[in-house]
Image: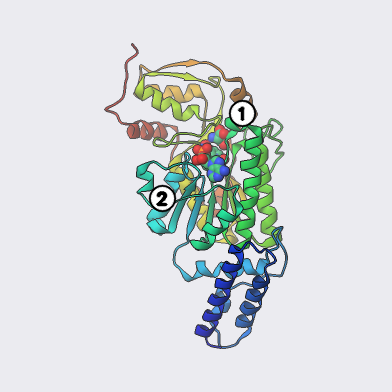
Amino acid sequence: MTSAEADAILKTAADNYTATCYSGDRKMPVMRAVSTVARRALLTPDCGCLPQVIAVRGISFSPRQVVASDASFHSVSFSETDHPKVLITGGLGQLGVGLAKMLRKRFGKNNVILSDIRKPASHVFCSGPFIYSDILDYKNLREIVVNNRITWLVHYSALLSAVGEANVPLAREVNITGFHNILDIAVEHGLRLFVPSTIGAFGATSPRNPTPDLCVQRPRTIYGVSKVHAELMGEYYHHKYGLDFRCLRYPGIISADSQPGGGTTDYAVQIFHDAVKTGRFECNLKPDTRLPMMYIEDCLRATLEVMEAPADTLAMRTYNISAMSFTPEELACEVQKQLPDLQVTYNIDPVRQAIADSWPMNFDDSNARRDWGWKHEYDLPELVQTMLGSLGSDSRVAHTS
Ligand SMILES: NC(=O)C1=CN([C@@H]2O[C@H](COP(=O)(O)OP(=O)(O)OC[C@H]3O[C@@H](n4cnc5c(N)ncnc54)[C@H](O)[C@@H]3O)[C@@H](O)[C@H]2O)C=CC1
Ligand SMILES: CC(=O)[C@H](N)C(=O)O
C-alpha cells in the first residue's frame, strides 16, 4: 500500500467516525473500523511515513467507551502541521484573553480559539476566533473539537475560591462535572490537555512555608477540593489512558487589563486600580497575610513553556510555579514608593481571610525549575512598576482629598 492510499483510507475512516459521533451513537462501530484500518496501514511495509505519526497503544476503555489507540489516531492531525490547534475554555476571564494573544503570536491567529459562555467585548471578538462553549454541554464541546481539529485544550473555566464558597452547587457542577467532560473529550481525541491548579489546592494541614509539590492536600473550599480532584484525575488518566495531561499550580495572578473573577487574591489587583483612580484602597485581607503571587506575563509564559516541554522532561504532571510572595502591607509600601499619597485601610472579609490563612505563604517550585527550566522574571518591584506603567501614569491620582 502506498502512503497516499493509506492517507485516503485514514481520511475516509476519520470522516465516517466524525459522522458517527454527530449522530450521537456511542456504540462506536466505526471507531473499531478506524482502529483496524489504522493498524493495517501501520503493518503495511511500503507505508513508510505512517508509523512515525501514529502511536498504537494497548486497547483499553475510557468511561465513554473510547478506544485509547483511537485517541492516538486523532493526534495524527497535530503531527501533520507545524502548529497546534488550541481551544481555550473559560477564555473571557482574567487569564484567557492574554493567553490567546500570546499563543496567537506564536501559532497564528486562526490556530487559537477562545471560548466562553459570556459575550466577548468587541475588541476581543475582533482579535481572533471566538466561539460559544459551555463545558457542561459535552456534545457541543465534542463538535467544536472535531470541527476545528483541535489538538491542544487549555481548560480555564472555573469558579474561583470566593465565588465558589458563595455558590457551592454551581462550583461543583462547573469545576467537577464540567472537568469530567473535558477529560473525556481530551482522551477521546488525543488532545494535549492543560488544566491550571492553584495554591488553593492546599489547606491548613499542608506545610505552608514553603509548600512543596508533594505533601498533604486537604483544602476546605469547594474550589480547592475540585482542583485536587482535577490534579488526581488528570494524572490518573495519564497513567491509565496515556492522556497528555499537564498542570501548573498557579499563585495569585496579577494583571492590569483584565479583572479577577472572584478569588481570595483579588485584592492584589484591585489595589493598583484604586491607587491610580482614587488614591485610596480598602483591603479585605489582614495586613500581614502572606500569599504567593505572580505577574500575568510570567504565568502565561510558564503555561506555554510547560505545554511545549518534551514529555520526557516532565518527571511529574502537576508542578508548583512561583515568583514572589508578599503581604498587603508589603505591597502597599511598594506602591507607595511611587504613589506616596496612597491611603490603605483594612476591612476584613472573614470568608476570604479564613481561606487565605489556610493557603501556602511561600511556594516551593524547585521541581519545575529543575525539570523544564522554569524561571520567573517579575519580582515585587518590577511588578509594581509594570502595573502602574500599564494603568497609565497620566491618569494617576496621587491626591488624598
Ligand atoms: N487568576 C488567578 O489568580 C488564578 C487562576 N487559576 C486558574 O486559572 C483558570 C483561569 O482563571 P481566571 O481567568 O482567573 O478565572 P475567571 O474566573 O476570571 O474566569 C473563568 C471563566 O470561566 C467561565 N465559565 C464559567 N462557567 C462556565 C461554563 N459552564 N462553561 C464555560 N465557561 C465557563 C466564566 O464565564 C469565566 O469567564 C481557572 O481555572 C483558575 O482556577 C489558578 C490560580 C490562580
Ligand atoms: C489563587 C487562586 O486560585 C485565585 N486567584 C483565588 O484567589 O481564588
Which disc, if any, is residue 372?
Answer: none
N-terminal-most mark, 2 or 1? 2
Which disc, if any, is residue 166?
Answer: 1
**Residue 277 position within the rendered picture, expressed as x and y whole percent measured from the top left:** 35, 23
Query: Is residue 225 visible to the viewer in this orientation of the structure?
Result: yes
SS assignment at label 1: helix
Residue that badge 2 annotates = 102
Q: Rounded to the nearest whole Å, what is the CA distance between mark 2 and mark 1?
A: 33 Å
From the viewer's perspective, tell me whether residue 47 is left or right of residue 238.
Answer: left
- Above or below, 225 against 25 in this view is above
- Above or below, 170 against 231 in this view is above
Say which amino acid is labelled 2: Met
Colouring method of the image: rainbow
- Above or below, 315 against 199 in this view is below
- Residue lying at the far top of the rendered structure: 401
**Residue 258 position within the rendered picture, expressed as x and y whole percent measured from the top left:** 42, 37
Residue 315 quadrant: bottom right
- Picture quarter with the C terminus: top left
Query: Is residue 157 visible to the viewer in this orientation of the structure?
Result: no
**Residue 148 position within the rendered picture, expressed as x and y whole percent measured from the top left:** 48, 61
Q: Residues within 10 Å of mark 2 (few under 14, many from 20)?
A: some
**Residue 325 position within the rendered picture, expressed as x and y whole percent measured from the top left:** 52, 32
- Above or below, 292 against 8 in this view is above
Queried on whether the Cβ of the residue with tag 2 lies below 8 angstroms from ligand 1, the answer reads no
Q: Residue at x 54, y 54 (%)?
A: 153
Q: Residues within 10 Å of mark 1 (few under 14, many from 20)?
A: few
Closer to the camera in the image, 37 or 267: 37
In front: mark 2 or mark 1?
Answer: 1
Say which amino acid is labelled 1: Ala
